[in-house]
Image (spheres, coloured by chain):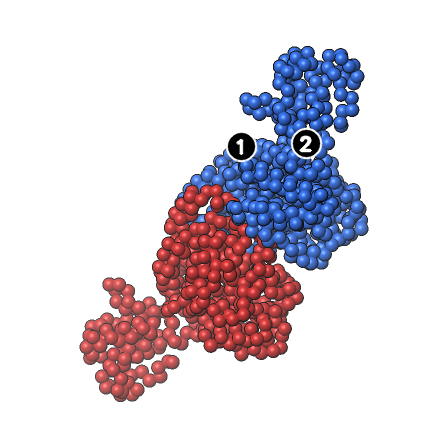
Chain colours: A red, B blue
Amino acid sequence: MKKEHPVQVNGKENGKGNGQPRYLVLADEVQTMIEAGTLRPGDRIPSIRHLSERYRVSIPTVLHAYTVLEDRRLVEARPKSGFYVRARLSSGTEVPSFSRRIPSPKTLSRFAPLMALVDDVANPRLVPMGGANPSPALLPSEKLARITGAIARRQARAVVQYDPPPGCPALRREISRRSVEWGTYLPPEDFLLTNGATEALHLALRTVAKPGDTVMVESPIYYGILHLLSRLGLRTVAVPSSPREGLPIGAVRKVLEREKVAALIVIPNFSNPLGSLMPEAARAELVALAAQRQIPIIEDDIYGDLSHRGERPACLKSLDADGGVLLCGSFSKTLAPGYRAGYIAGGRWHREILEAKVALTFGGSPLPSLAIAEFLRNGGYDHHLRRLRATFREQILRMREAVAAAFPREAKISDPQGGFVLWIELARQVDSMVLFEKAREAGISIAPGHLFSPAAEFRNCIRLSCGHPRTPAMEKAVATLGELAKRMSG
Amino acid sequence: MKKEHPVQVNGKENGKGNGQPRYLVLADEVQTMIEAGTLRPGDRIPSIRHLSERYRVSIPTVLHAYTVLEDRRLVEARPKSGFYVRARLSSGTEVPSFSRRIPSPKTLSRFAPLMALVDDVANPRLVPMGGANPSPALLPSEKLARITGAIARRQARAVVQYDPPPGCPALRREISRRSVEWGTYLPPEDFLLTNGATEALHLALRTVAKPGDTVMVESPIYYGILHLLSRLGLRTVAVPSSPREGLPIGAVRKVLEREKVAALIVIPNFSNPLGSLMPEAARAELVALAAQRQIPIIEDDIYGDLSHRGERPACLKSLDADGGVLLCGSFSKTLAPGYRAGYIAGGRWHREILEAKVALTFGGSPLPSLAIAEFLRNGGYDHHLRRLRATFREQILRMREAVAAAFPREAKISDPQGGFVLWIELARQVDSMVLFEKAREAGISIAPGHLFSPAAEFRNCIRLSCGHPRTPAMEKAVATLGELAKRMSG
């Protein structure tokens, strides 16, 4: 999209600009200066007065050009200071590539968890960009604390007791109410409460697949799912996923023709780590394809509530006519990971999943469930979500800019539609495990890319979580990461 | 032990009584009247004055005889009312029998959970003698509520966050401190927190055994363990266990000589359902035997804190020299089942179990863990335990008496040394599943015996939980059960 013919305003040169409104011609002119490097990220762009004089246009025309440049995400206004060039995030910034090859199944006989990354979650001394955790500063922790305390007092005897599966009726009722937002309606009795979405995925997988079976996943894919597949003795076929549109239906079809697949795991809404969003047509095709072949779909909707713009997307479950979709979710990314408020709507496997839950962990904890239920009923969850979405969107944007400014030029950065993680592809020669170690030594937690692949691909990728508010320490951390990446790319 | 030669006091007849202190002779005399049915359960025994006159002994002698009869659990004092004959629980009451045969392994391909029993846990309309649940009325629920509320407010941000394995350091510290009571000392880093003891057992089993392996258990055994074994595709060899002394070491040895066993599951302290307590010598032999053959022991110590008299027994783990014992426990029977505060000290499998926990349910909930930790530190846990033990002991005693009075004479009743469940063996022809259904129709929850066996043995047994305070409804329920059992025995 690079402009090849910079134009002068006011007919000094009447190339492509001819016939265009003057503000657009001016905007193009400034864009050219930015793309040519004449104006660099962080530079203040020429003042209204200066531009008005230099290009002989009116002040409203300059202002109009500024708004166009803002819309193009090239400049940003800083209060009482003027307009500045944003970091390189022109349309020229590439999102990470993805392969079109058709993969073959892999045995995850020993997918090693990166325990250092798990430990990092509870380490306050690290800049927290490793685990995909929302900062407690962004969660309604005070309100939840008040609700929790009140319920503990009011229902002192109820909350010490077992909460046998399917679990707390009040919470299942509230989740059911919210299911309308997901493009469907699921009654409370369709849900089983779980210890986070992790247990939901575990129960789903162990119910629809047996050791040795092959499960299709997206690639890259959240490492927790690969770890789970490994523990359950499952084989994996990992279909390269589009950074924008998720699982490509053509590739799915080809794999299903070639392989016997016991189940599909899909994150249609803001996949982790790509942040991709499956288009509606692809969703319908996917559900139809799976139904026709009687292959269960395990849908991980944990980021569904975190769209960056517009409506909350529907879930695949809303297209499910025969109970073949097992919907897994939780409030761990939006309210309180520590409350372990997960759920599964297991479709035609509901009963079997319930029995497995009884065997493996028995019940849940009534107090956290009651507190989440109360928050969903009266706590202003939608209001909270609006703020949280805007915050994550902004944090993602800032992080993209910071990464673009600090990292080597060849770095490709994902452009997530929701959620709060970024996926960054670095030069081939960068080993992200080395980067992970060096970053950790520098007090920074990141997630290395090979964790997101059953075949240890993406060695040159990293995932950065933007779940925490930006701080000077984080700014510095991104600069440090960029320096490390540059040195390793050299 | 029946006295064959009733004696008259005061030399009227100088048989066996000769030379014995008079109070003992008098006590024997009253015992004879009780055993002969002259005095029946519930009858008031003759007054001090009456006995003193009738047998021409001093009042202190009569009082002394009363205390002997109390010690023999033949009579009980009722405040301001006198002494009464207790229900038939003379030394003649039999505990359930157990077989000496050496069993062969069973495949638990589909051990069906009795979901009705799980549902009953949350059904306040049933007399709760089914699930082994402590009544919230006996738990320090108010104090826990206060502690929980205070922590929620004080640490609002901390408690919404993930608590990654091994879990809440404060709780692991307190459990470690308590391990001294178990005849050993285990440092905090030996523990991993789990979602109740159920998850602890699950993690232990899936780590030390793989599908198709054989695991040795006691028989009868808590059905949750059988359900777990079934879900994990494990075979089971169930060694008949002594109602008083638990797993017989001779039988264990024979089975180990004959079968390849991947692990042993043992409840040495107050097994569920028998309430048996393994003698110390047998424990040492068991641990040595397993160590020598490199067979891991999974120890379920969930009832360990609930001894009816004397010290808390040690755990097998205290005899473990090489990390071969995996100790599982929780505070579900003593503080709050709904807080899911379980733990495992996994010995040499600690790391592997931790990784499995990360994959299967990830972390726990920090708030309940912090609350239990605070209760253990400052809440008077030992004081609470003393009361709870005395209460359970009393409730077990009352229930034994009530069952002895209401059930058919051939009923055999366990004599638990701790915990709060009774095991009752009925006539061969009684089908306890039918009894379960009939009881449920009558508003009573009990646990049918076949659930406690991998081979659906114990069809004529039931387990009654005494975790709830006795109420008139419970008295009536026991009478109803007795009636039902009598009709089915006839």
Which residue has dot 2 on it? B89
* Circle 2 Cα neighbour tier, 10 Å, few/some/many (<14 / 14–19 / ≥20): many
Taking the spot 70% from the left edge, 56% from the top edge, the residue there is B108
Taking the spot 59% from the left edge, 35% from the top edge, the residue there is B395
Please, is residue A134 above or below residue B313 in the view?
Answer: below
Which residue has dot 1 on it? B383
- Where's residue B135, x and y in %? 54, 40
SS category of the residue bearing label 2: loop
Residue B177 seen:
no
**A472 lies left or right of B245:** left
Taking the spot 60% from the left edge, 57% from the top edge, the residue there is A356
Residue B70 seen:
yes
Please, is residue B482 above or below residue A334 in the view?
Answer: above
* Circle 1 Cα neighbour tier, 10 Å, few/some/many (<14 / 14–19 / ≥20): few
- Where's residue A76, x and y in %? 30, 68
SS category of the residue bearing label 1: helix
- Where's residue B364, x and y in %? 52, 51
Kindly identify the amino acid type of the residue bearing the numbered disc 1: His
Q: Quadrant of residue A218?
A: bottom right
- Where's residue B115, x and y in %? 59, 53
Kindly identify the amino acid type of the residue bearing the numbered disc 2: Leu
Q: Nearer the viewer, mark 2 or mark 1?
A: 2
Identify the image quadrant of the C terminus of chain B.
Answer: top right
Chain letter behind tag 2: B
Instruction: Specify whether disc 2 shares its chain with disc 1.
Output: yes
Looking at the image, is mark 2 or mark 1 earlier in the sequence?
Answer: 2
Q: Nearer the viewer, residue B182 or A450?
A: B182
